[in-house]
């Protein structure tokens, strides 16, 4: 059975929802990563209390301030993490941070469209760019052949709501800016898969399901997928990904999705 065994993982948007649950389940693994960098905008704020409690119980969980929409914040986080790693590379970057704003075609605004795009697309682009040297280092120094999430990988948390072929849940919520941003994130992932292929950095767009989180429950209707189940399946899927999956759009169970 394939195992996920990265030495160093970074998860953006770790103070709640999928990001927090990823950190929680990663530290609970018998072969847990040595370093888990859990980033969020405001580690000292009330919304990060649960993450702080989790980090206090587990060594190697480092809460790092990082606002994905601010280049200076991303660079500061990278400098801090590079210093703490002391020459070790970053194996797995999970671009999880994202936002959703309710809208229809009639009510969508330029301001909200720009804000959602900034967080959901530009953010993952910037984070990937700034942490690329650490990803390259991990890939270069790994004895593993080919590509894997234990060697060097970028996982962009996307959504089936951004699938042009599917347009999942349109009758439940148009959320135009969110859908457009996730379609763009899928294209970014495809571009990254081509641009970083020579460095053997695996790049994947991952739909976690319609999950029971604050964001998932903000859309009309009840999110069907429990948070812990989604993340458990994600962590079961990641070890099986290799160069054959580079640049693909998959769901939490590893099934291919329509672009």
Image (tube, rainbow, N blue to C red):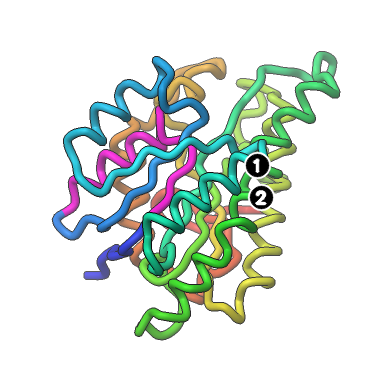
**Magenta region includes residue 13:** yes
The boundaries of the magenta stretch are: 9-29
Which residue is rendered at x = 21% and y = 33% of the image? 56
| Nearer the observer, 193 or 72 | 72
Query: Would residue 63 be found to the left or right of residue 106 on screen?
Result: left
Instruction: Give the farthest residue toward the left.
Output: 30
**Magenta region includes residue 217:** no
Q: Say which element carries label 1.
A: helix
Q: Say which element carries label 2.
A: helix
Q: Are marks 2 and 1 in contact (CB under 8 Å)?
A: no
Q: Nearer the viewer, mark 2 or mark 1?
A: 1
* Mark 2 to mark 1 CA distance (whole Å): 10 Å
Task: Report the residue marked by disc 1.
Answer: 72
Task: Tell me residue 189's x, y (percent).
Answer: 64, 58
Task: Tell me residue 104's x, y (percent).
Answer: 76, 18
Indicate whether 156 appears above or below 141. Answer: above
Quadrant where the N terminus is found in the figure: bottom left
Q: How many marks?
A: 2
Which residue is rendered at x = 69% and y = 55% of the image? 188
Task: Tell me residue 235's x, y (percent).
Answer: 32, 52
Which residue is rendered at x = 74% and y = 37% of the image? 180
Indicate whether 248 appears above or below 198. Answer: above
Task: Report the residue marked by disc 2.
Answer: 126
């Amino acid at each position: 059975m394939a195992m996920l065994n990265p030495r160093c993982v970074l998860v953006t948007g770790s103070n709640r929802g999928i990001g927090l649950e990823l950190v929680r389940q990663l530290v609970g693994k018998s072969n847990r990563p040595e370093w888990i960098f859990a980033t969020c905008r405001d580690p000292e704020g009330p919304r990060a209390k649960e993450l702080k409690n989790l980090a206090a119980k587990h060594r190697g969980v480092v809460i790092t301030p990082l606002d994905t929409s601010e280049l200076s914040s991303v660079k500061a986080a990278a400098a801090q993490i590079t210093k703490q790693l002391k020459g070790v590379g970053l194996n797995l970057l999970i671009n999880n941070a994202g936002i959703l704003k309710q809208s229809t075609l009639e009510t969508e605004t330029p301001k909200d469209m720009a804000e959602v795009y900034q967080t959901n697309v530009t953010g993952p682009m910037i984070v990937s760019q700034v942490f690329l040297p650490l990803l390259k280092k991990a890939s270069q120094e790994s004895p593993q052949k080919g590509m894997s999430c234990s060697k060097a990988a970028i996982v962009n948390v996307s959504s089936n709501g951004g699938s042009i072929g599917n347009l999942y849940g349109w009758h439940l919520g148009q959320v135009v800016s969110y859908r457009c941003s996730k379609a763009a994130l899928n294209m970014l992932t495809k571009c990254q898969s081509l641009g970083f292929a020579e460095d053997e950095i695996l790049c994947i767009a991952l739909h976690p399901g319609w999950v029971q989180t604050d964001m998932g429950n903000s859309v009309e209707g009840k999110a069907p997928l429990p948070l812990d189940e989604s993340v458990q399946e994600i962590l079961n899927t990641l070890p099986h990904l290799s160069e054959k999956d580079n640049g693909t759009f998959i769901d939490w169970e590893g099934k291919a999705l329509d672009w």
